[in-house]
Image (tube, coloured by chain):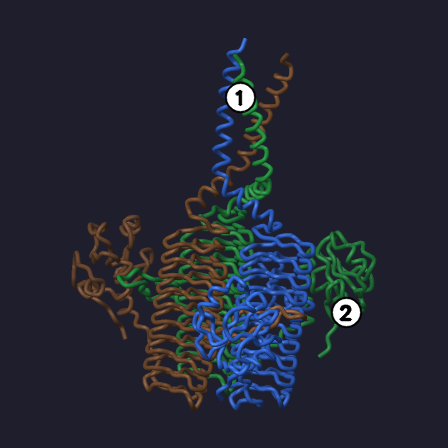
Chain colours: A brown, B blue, C green
Amino acid sequence: VPRSLTLTEVAELAGGRVEGDPERRVDAVRALASAGPGDLAFVTAERFRGAAEASVAGALLVPPSLADVDRDRVVCADPGLGIVAVLERLYPEPRPAAGVHSTAVVAATATVHPEASVGPLAVVGERTVLEARVAVHAGAVLGDDCRVGEGSTLHPRVVLYPRTVLGRDVIVHAGAVVGSDGFGYATGPSGPVKVPQVGCVIVEDRVEIGANTAIDRATLEATRIGADSKLDNLVQVGHNVELGPACIVCGQAGVAGSTRLGRGVVLGGQAGVADHLEIGDRVQIAAASAALQSLGADQVVAGIPAVEIRQWRRQTSGIARLGQMLRRLRALEKTLEAEEERHGDDP
Amino acid sequence: VPRSLTLTEVAELAGGRVEGDPERRVDAVRALASAGPGDLAFVTAERFRGAAEASVAGALLVPPSLADVDRDRVVCADPGLGIVAVLERLYPEPRPAAGVHSTAVVAATATVHPEASVGPLAVVGERTVLEARVAVHAGAVLGDDCRVGEGSTLHPRVVLYPRTVLGRDVIVHAGAVVGSDGFGYATGPSGPVKVPQVGCVIVEDRVEIGANTAIDRATLEATRIGADSKLDNLVQVGHNVELGPACIVCGQAGVAGSTRLGRGVVLGGQAGVADHLEIGDRVQIAAASAALQSLGADQVVAGIPAVEIRQWRRQTSGIARLGQMLRRLRALEKTLEAEEERHGDDP
Amino acid sequence: VPRSLTLTEVAELAGGRVEGDPERRVDAVRALASAGPGDLAFVTAERFRGAAEASVAGALLVPPSLADVDRDRVVCADPGLGIVAVLERLYPEPRPAAGVHSTAVVAATATVHPEASVGPLAVVGERTVLEARVAVHAGAVLGDDCRVGEGSTLHPRVVLYPRTVLGRDVIVHAGAVVGSDGFGYATGPSGPVKVPQVGCVIVEDRVEIGANTAIDRATLEATRIGADSKLDNLVQVGHNVELGPACIVCGQAGVAGSTRLGRGVVLGGQAGVADHLEIGDRVQIAAASAALQSLGADQVVAGIPAVEIRQWRRQTSGIARLGQMLRRLRALEKTLEAEEERHGDDP
């Protein structure tokens, strides 16, 4: 099905206005460097003006600061946001057909909505409920007593342990594991003793969970991923953790057991948060940093252990000058020694 | 099957004594904050006295230091350990029925004990042996020539590469991969050349391996995970590594190739250990730290590179004072310059 | 099939010469410490001379510096490279039989070469092409419109998202996910808004991808893994990343979105590279380090943030001396105060 859009249609989708030929058609969105005459490219900031002017893209989606660029164009407040609806129209995600594939293994007591889809070789456990428009892709394994809300997508080979609850429009990427046993051991007379993890994981609406990410279920209650939170690939979430809504957790970051993150917290790639902490709303923890203490709202921190980011920058530049400091210290010592000797000569 | 326990039964399971009504029944274990009148909550330390007193839990499992709390209660030496048997009784893990699911693919030369269970869409390779009470869950793939000891559990989508050996009562969580090729390359004239990895992985009794963890097989001999060791999610274990018994490896930690860890070593979350090192018994490496040198027994280290933890604390506080040190250094330099000038005036 | 080799054959395979009995037979390659009279062991460097002499291996593969060791031996320029062909001969990797297993689910529009193999319970999507000698192992899931080049191997439970392209002789280990959605969100009025990721992943010839590694597809164009690059386990590659040829990425390392690595770049274990950077040819980033800025060719860096490695060593030793520096600073201050007081007494 070939699709294309006029710039008038692009402007409607992106929430902008056309400058130039409103009837020009684009049939693909490409990067500035690779776009050709039939393509739309988008530019997010003034600093890409040179690249935009050098591009041979047929049309551009630009911010107001680039409204004057000499090309058929659509001007909108935020091209990074405006492009979303354009991409959705030009590249519709194929939804699998409703129904259960003949090779899937669905328990007799499971409830699969007639508009839900269960792909080949997927497994759905006892009493598990799939609501309307749920898509369970090939090879996913859902344990007993799970619930998956309307419109949610489980990519190939996702595993939900028993009792996992997903809200609406949740996306779980391939290989992610939700609800695995928390890492809890008591100290027995002859080594570590496993503490049964009898809680669950609750994933709220519109959460996205990356490939091969692991989220442990709670010891007693619920590990909770708040609505609109987005977790990247290979993220680790320990048992009893609560992520406030709209958190962003970048690749390979980890949150240790029983820690609570507020609303809109951002963890950079490979960042870590220690266990049993409280991280306030909108805190940002830089990539490759580790928060080892609780943090009040709105702090921006970096380093291991993480400190306020300006302090971290000062520390970093201080460390870079350590050699120089040591030399200056030695110079002072010598000067003083020389003085002492001179004074020693004094009568 | 509804279950409940009297406090007398709780005391027997936990190894403690009842204070208050021995006939009081509890049917669930909940966290202090969410427990209601029908629930048991447990308290591990004196510092939770306030929370314990504020809780409306019907009964408490407490340590001797809280023996006086005003509630029907069971007092035991270590509630964190005592609760284990209570949880096991109230929340028995359902074991899958023995037998091979009709959709599993089991090689003709494999040996599956009649009391073992192979779930839907699992694959068991040639000559692989599953001993009594082994549970292979849905979608797990066991290569050729593996052996899985009595009572071990492989959660959904675990992969064992050929020749992997698991001991008794091993638990492998969903998505974990055991026995993948070690990361070994020689330098050829036109780029890296793969060195065949012809060894295996041996996992000893009672080991637990977390979700999406990866353990590479040895180049020639065996990568070995010692008995009672517990590995959390997303852990990386390189080829030829040997983990002594009873090691604790927290989430996203990694051990590079050919390194040996002694007995009871603890790696915090995201900790790393470089290759070809010897890490002594009971060494503890803090979260977000990296051991780049071998370590003698009983050391507790932190930082990148990891140093003795008190030294790391001093370094950390020293780094925090770098700005101040620099100011003091400048002040000294000025003072001395001023003196020099004054002395310069001297006859 | 028992196999053994004479030392003459070993010398031919390894590209070396026999010293001692050319008819001596070896039937296994073992580590120095465990090899017995029927085994070959290999020694890569002069510093293992003691271990080589102590070994009871029947024969040794040694470098020229150990040509004089008293044992039947093969001397070759690089035993670490020479052993490769010997291992390949003694331990041939069994290739699965060609053909599609009866339990695999292959789309009617897929093209499977008659010499390709699709294992049990694997899934191959619409219009996907498997070339000659491709091996898709049990439980792997290939989406629609993928292409897998000649001789490539997909281990159990690999997932390729739609439109993924693999070159020739690529190896993808169990649980790896290639082509998952890039982590891209615009800021909407009520929280993060998912940006459709309509690009793909292109993996070039002879790449090896480790267990449970995740590679995201590009937003618009292609995430690209250059020929001969080797990625270890649990590696994260963000969207739009380009890895030059022959890169080595060790376990748990990560490359954030839109960063480009040149030819032959090496990332140590748990290393990270921030987004939108240019990393020059042959750059080496040490384990547990994080590159937060672009780097010119041939740099060797370490630390967080990563700096030139000699500078990092100086910083590290400087940090270790911070306590001592502080004490020296105090001593100077006291000396000066004492002087000031004395001068204060001066007329």
Q: CA distance from mark 1 to mark 2?
A: 82 Å
Q: Chain of mark 1?
A: C
Residue found 83% across the figure and 57% down from its top: C70
Which residue, given by chain and number where applicable, does mark 2 sit on?
A: C26
Q: Secondary structure at mark 2?
A: strand
Image height of C43 relative to A178, above or below: above
Residue type of the residue flagged with mark 1: Glu
Query: Is residue B311 found left or right of A43 in the rendered image?
Result: right
Residue found 48% across the figure and 79% down from its top: B28
Evaluate whether residue A126 shows in this view: yes
Q: Chain of mark 2?
A: C
Which residue, given by chain and number where applicable, does mark 1 sit on?
A: C340
Mark 1, other Cα within 10 Å: few <14 / some 14–19 / many ≥20? some
Query: Is residue A230 found left or right of B147 in the rendered image?
Result: left
Q: Position of residue B270 (x, y in %)?
A: 53, 59
Image height of B120 relative to C84, above or below: below
Residue found 51% across the figure and 26% down from its top: B333
Q: Position of residue B11 (x, y in %)?
A: 59, 78
